[in-house]
Amino acid sequence: MVASGGLTPRPSLGFSLRLVAFFTGLILVVTGHLILFNPEHYGHRLDRFPGQLVREFTRFRLDILPYGVLPGIMLFFLGTLLMAVLLAGRSSQTGESACSIPPVRCNPLRWTGWLGLAVAVGFSLCAAGMLARESPPPAAAVFWFSSMWIWCGWLYFRDRDRDTRPGYPLSGRETGIVLILMLVNLAWVSHDLYDWRWSGTPDEAHFFMTARAFMEGRLDRFILSENGVFGYHPVLSTCYQIFFMRLPGPDGYGWRLSSAFALSVTLPFIYILGRELWNRRTGILAAVIFGWTKIAVGFSHLGYNNVQVYPVLIGSLALFVWACRRRSLTGYFLSGWIAGIGFYTYYAARLAPILTILLGLCLGGLPLIRRDRQRTAVLFLGIMLAVMPLFLHPGDFLAHMLQQTAVTGGVQITHEDVSYYLGRYLKTGEHGTRIMDHWFLTFIHGLYFRWPHHFQTHPVVDPISYSLAFIGLWICLLEMARNRQNRFLGLSFLVTSFVVGAISSHDRPPLTRLLVLSPFLGLLAAVALERVPGVFATSRKTVRSLAVAGVVLITGCVVAWNVTAIHISLNRDHHGYGDGTTGELLRQSRLFPETTQIVYLQREGTHMQCVDLIMDEYGFGNRMTLFRPPDNRAFRHLSKIQPPFAVFLDLDNLQESVKFKMLLNSRFPQGNWRHTDPGRRWSLIYFHIP
């Protein structure tokens, strides 16, 4: 077995004592959540208690924690720790698998094997030579991809000689279950991808315009470079989006479908990872909890490349743990290759090689003995070949990576500036407090996140799964010394939370990066939830059955909470992104016939930018005209415009507004000015002539 638990059974407490301890912890957790739902109200109540200590407690670190938040956090920590102590040591059978571990035969290489090895090495060297140029030719990418497949083919034949072929990791029943989960998740996420309620995010539009420019041949960049969106995002992540845009058409739906698919295709991987490290129940619970978590689902509706981190990160870990069980050279190589491919998606996916190596160290899956060390060698070979195009240009690679961290504060730099900014950051001693503050805020983001963004609302993670995840984290920390799989999960969560949160360049860890923690939170929650029936272990079958039914009910409540929270967030708390004016413009424009011209006069001071690009995502590019701010060009345009048209105003200058109204009233006296949604902050004034 790859991941035997090796746990010594804990001394059993009495059934009544277990129930008392369990529900005491539950009460503490619920109380903590209640305080965090309205911290100011409960903070004032706590202030009524005598003593300066209580008042200092509610006001501790007000620069990062609002008034009254800390008491709720402390109660939550105590409650989850008490429940974790109760659940620790109650793990079920670990390391279930659909196949047994095969024996390894050591057959020497024949002449055909040496020939294949020479071809693989030759292609890799040719690719390296072309990729090292300042402007690599397109043939370099062809040689790079070809070398990957040649190595895979050569290693597969080596596996055949060794009787260690990777095989298929799922049984027929498991395949059916994860396929149903994938299809249900994809159908739920994609059914409203094109809804106007998900519109309005300004910087998202740049990803769409870049993808369409590549697709239409108006932009030509080397596919393995980082000269994509904003000049530092990898081009390959845009090519992934282009593949989906070719299916339904070059519009926003196919572009966003790439994100929805990235979430859904991760579910089989997280199931395999959970099953191999723990058991089938943990795997299925992790897949359900992660697949329906609010942050992951929300960002799967957007066209960023953030969600692309999921299949790369979890896929490399799942493939590694399966390859470790099968002792497959092909599996090790593909695991390293997929981990390296993370460098071409979102920057946080560059954690994949680190976490894959960490998993190998925790499981003892990186052997160095002569008979087995080739497995370790091909893992590193896959990683190095995958990242070779970027590492051959280290200056640009470091510059692009550092400018997304606190080292540069988000300022775009070149390779010539790397040493200056890095030296300045390391010499300054004032960053230690900021790093620890951000790391702490990353840990509690599911409890309290100040000013949620990108269509998220407080709490950004549902209270049930986040409570379970923290119980799971405490369990991993308590069992770290004697349980290898829990050691990996605990350390991977700590490392990931540090990288994506602590060194963020923003004033607080943003949700665009914290979403990377979602699969680990799902696994932690599943580890805790799977152990809950052990608390109610008794000889009475009725009690055990009720405990198992409780696990199913809790999982259903997690799904129901997230589905309901997303529905409420879209339909009540938000009206598209920001102040909602872009979403309102899109909503109203869809009510007009397709021949209607849309003119939008927008004030300069608003943060609702890129409106014309966003309207282009939804098919209004050819009939949408934006004037920001409205000037003489807008006046001349409206002086010549002919029906059918609709003019929308979002102006804060009364004199300007009157000028345009008088112009259109004089030309079309039969028209009327109306409000799209009177009394709401997103309401626009419009003039429609059919």
Image: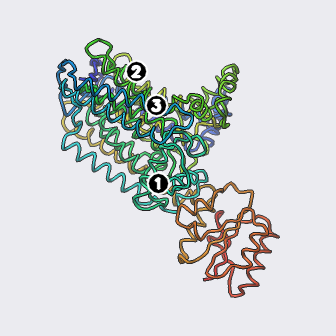
Residue 84 falls in which quadrant of the image?
top left
Query: What is the spatial separation of the Cα atoms under label 3 and label 1, in whole angstroms?
Result: 27 Å
Q: Quadrant of the C terminus?
A: bottom right
Mark in the foreground, 3 or 2: 3
Pointer 3: residues within 10 angstroms few (<14), some, or many (20+)?
some
Q: Position of residue 371 (x, y in %)?
A: 25, 14
Q: Is 381 in front, or is 288?
A: 381
Who comes first in sequence, dot 2 or dot 1? 1
Please give left or right for residue 429 compared with residue 366 in the image: right
Q: Position of residue 327 (x, y in %)?
A: 25, 24
Q: Name the residue carrying label 2.
A: 478
- Residue 641, numbered circle: none
Query: What is the spatial separation of the Cα atoms under label 2 and label 1, in whole angstroms?
Result: 41 Å
Q: Secondary structure at mark 1?
A: helix
Q: Name the residue carrying label 1.
A: 256
Q: Quadrant of the N terminus?
A: top left
Q: Position of residue 228 (x, y in %)?
A: 55, 45
Tell me if I can see residue 657 in this picture.
yes
Q: Is 476 in front, or is 637?
A: 637
- Amino acid under disc 1: Arg
Query: What is the spatial separation of the Cα atoms under label 3 and label 2, in whole angstroms?
Result: 36 Å
Q: Position of residue 522 (x, y in %)?
A: 39, 38
Tell me if I can see residue 351 in this picture.
no
- Amino acid under disc 2: Leu
Q: Name the residue carrying label 3.
A: 387
Pointer 1: residues within 10 angstroms few (<14), some, or many (20+)?
many
Q: Is residue 585 above or below residue 74?
A: below
Who comes first in sequence, dot 3 or dot 1? 1
Q: Is residue 189 above or below residue 124?
A: below
Please give left or right for residue 298 compared with residue 627 in the image: left
